[in-house]
């Protein structure tokens, strides 16, 4: 194998892309910047539409044989890939942390989480069951079987460069599909290393390919125009998801969309305040708040609002902001200058409209923003309408359960919502009333490879994880068989 991907990021390391079974350098390159230093530390190929076409053709060709492998053979390769990812956890975590600024301890956690999807789908691969069912004709028998949907195109975001890829690639491969991934331009390295490890454990050419590109729409056009690409799976913003949904319509591709969120966190007066603070911290501040399921609106019942606010502010003030490469760092930089501008704009707008800064509230050096708690937040402020995607916890108050539910649901988004209460009946009532795909009850960190992850409304279509995630890559085929009723003598 000819690839530079095993070098540690020190000087500028040129990475290659795996297309049609070959590692290519590309006719041009794309810089990869470390958000902590804002220095270029690696380059990846700037793939062209011709490269995308080669990947497309290889995926289509490989599908014909990959789909015919037994599910046990596919499962065995996925298990080997799982092991290889864990064996290389530190190298991948370092590359991931360097390319998008995630603190190294969290980056290691992401690799373990990403690998868990591979292991889970290696197991699911052997459970692609069908059904027989009765039909009215006495001389007919019927069954439904499940088949791979076909070659898949995946477009992924920068905020989870490993997990957002494995939770698409592993179910696709488990189902018998081939898959081409276009990672975000901020974080292409993790994707390339994952492809390298798939190749290393014997993943056949064309089954999993990565195209890195500065112009996402030019390379994507090749996939959208092709009727042979049977599925689009996208994770990213609602705005881009909506565009790609329309483009996929031209060839009626099957579609999964994991889009933006605006998660409410409801804290009722019966909650244990210290535990609620702990869950809000886990929910809001991982990845410096750059997570689609991070809470963006914290509603606290009036009688405990002041006590909760001061405890949360103390915990947030104690967060260790620093170099993501250090083990102790809890908050790293934001991914890029545009992200920093958005966070600053949201906080400044909230303060102008009457919010109070309890801690933080300002940009630090480079791409860092101080972990922030805002009180007196009100509907109509920009951070109440858009995802902030930064380390900012906005606090609002409510009087009644009905008011809290109404406020929580008052958004076009429907990805994740959280509540904290010690009242079981309330926990059930409120979780049923919340219009979201995921509800955390006294749990601010719900994600696990076995669960159905996904949203409703503007947050997307479909689910990733567990049998639900596998079903997204399968089509149901109905076979009806007419039989002769009587035994015929020979
Ligand atoms: P983004 O701007 O929507 O980009 C996502 C991906 O789409 C990137 O690979 C990007 O490529 C690509 N893209 C952009 N324009 C395109 C086009 N015209 N044609 C084809 N591809 C195109 O999102 P992001 O900033 O990377 O990620 C943050 C967003 O993802 C947030 O909204 C977050 O909530 C959401 N997210 C959702 C989930 C979930 O499971 N629901 C999980 C994680 C993140 P380039 O990088 O080259 O522009």
Image (cartoon, rainbow, N blue to C red):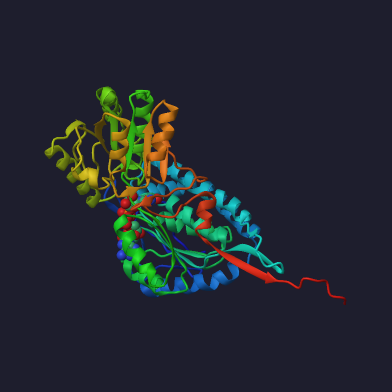
In this view, the residue in front, 421 or 192, is 421
Q: Residue at x 39, y 35 (%)?
A: 430
User: Can residue 404 be seen in the rendering of this structure?
Assistant: yes
Q: Residue 228, percent across and down?
A: 47, 73
Which quadrant holds the C terminus?
Answer: bottom right
Vertical placement of residue 99 versus 272, above or below = below
Q: Residue at x 27, y 22 (%)?
A: 303
Q: Residue 450, percent across and down?
A: 52, 45
Q: Residue 221, percent across and down?
A: 36, 71
Tell me if 354 is positioned left or right of 12 in this view. Answer: left
Vertical placement of residue 25 versus 166, above or below = below
Q: Residue at x 53, y 57 (%)?
A: 471
Tell me if 82 is positioned left or right of 99 in this view. Answer: right
Q: Residue at x 57, y 55 (%)?
A: 78
Q: Which image quadrant shows ligand 1?
A: bottom left
Q: Residue furthest right?
A: 490
């Amino acid at each position: 194998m000819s690839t530079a991907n095993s070098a540690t990021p020190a000087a500028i390391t040129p990475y290659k892309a795996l297309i049609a079974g070959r590692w290519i350098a590309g006719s041009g390159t794309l810089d990869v910047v470390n958000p902590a230093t804002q220095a270029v530390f690696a380059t990846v190929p700037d793939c062209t539409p011709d490269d995308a076409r080669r990947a497309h053709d290889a995926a289509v060709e490989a599908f014909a044989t990959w789909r015919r492998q037994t599910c046990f053979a596919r499962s065995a390769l996925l298990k080997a890939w799982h092991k290889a990812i864990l064996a290389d956890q530190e190298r991948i975590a370092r590359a991931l942390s360097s390319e998008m600024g995630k603190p190294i301890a969290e980056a290691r956690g992401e690799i373990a989480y990403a690998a868990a999807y591979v292991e889970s789908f290696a197991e699911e691969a052997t459970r692609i069951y069908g059904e027989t069912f009765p039909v009215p004709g006495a001389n007919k028998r019927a069954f439904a079987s499940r088949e791979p949907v076909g070659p898949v195109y995946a477009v992924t975001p920068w905020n989870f460069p490993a997990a957002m890829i494995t939770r698409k690639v592993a179910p696709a491969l488990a189902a018998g599909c081939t898959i081409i991934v276009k990672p975000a331009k901020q974080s292409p390295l993790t994707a390339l290393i994952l492809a390298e490890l798939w190749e290393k454990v014997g993943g056949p050419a064309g089954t999993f390919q990565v195209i890195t590109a500065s112009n996402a729409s030019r390379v994507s056009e090749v996939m959208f125009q092709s009727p042979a690409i049977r599925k689009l799976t996208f994770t990213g913003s609602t705005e881009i998801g909506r565009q790609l949904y329309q483009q996929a319509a031209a060839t009626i591709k099957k579609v999964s969309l994991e889009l933006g969120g605006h998660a409410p966190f409801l804290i009722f007066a019966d909650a244990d305040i210290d535990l609620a603070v702990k869950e809000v911290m886990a929910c809001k501040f991982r990845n410096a708040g750059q997570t689609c399921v991070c809470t963006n609106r914290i509603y606290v019942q009036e009688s405990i609002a002041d006590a909760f606010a001061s405890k949360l502010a103390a915990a947030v003030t104690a967060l260790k902001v620093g170099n993501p490469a250090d083990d102790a760092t809890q908050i790293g930089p934001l991914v890029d200058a545009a992200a920093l501008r958005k966070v600053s704009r949201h906080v400044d707008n909230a303060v102008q409209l009457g919010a109070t800064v309890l801690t933080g509230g300002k940009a630090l050096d480079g791409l860092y923003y101080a972990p922030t708690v805002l009180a007196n937040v009100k509907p109509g402020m920009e951070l109440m309408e858009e995802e902030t995607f930064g380390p900012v916890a906005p606090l609002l108050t409510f009087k009644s359960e009905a008011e809290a539910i109404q406020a929580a649901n008052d958004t076009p988004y429907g990805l994740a919502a959280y509540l904290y209460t010690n009242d079981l009946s309330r926990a059930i009532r409120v979780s049923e009333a919340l219009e979201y795909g995921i509800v955390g009850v006294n749990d601010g960190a719900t994600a696990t490879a076995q669960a159905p992850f996904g949203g409703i409304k503007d947050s997307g279509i479909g689910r990733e994880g567990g049998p639900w995630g596998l079903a997204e890559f399968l089509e149901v085929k109905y076979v009806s068989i007419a039989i002769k009723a009587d035994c015929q003598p020979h």
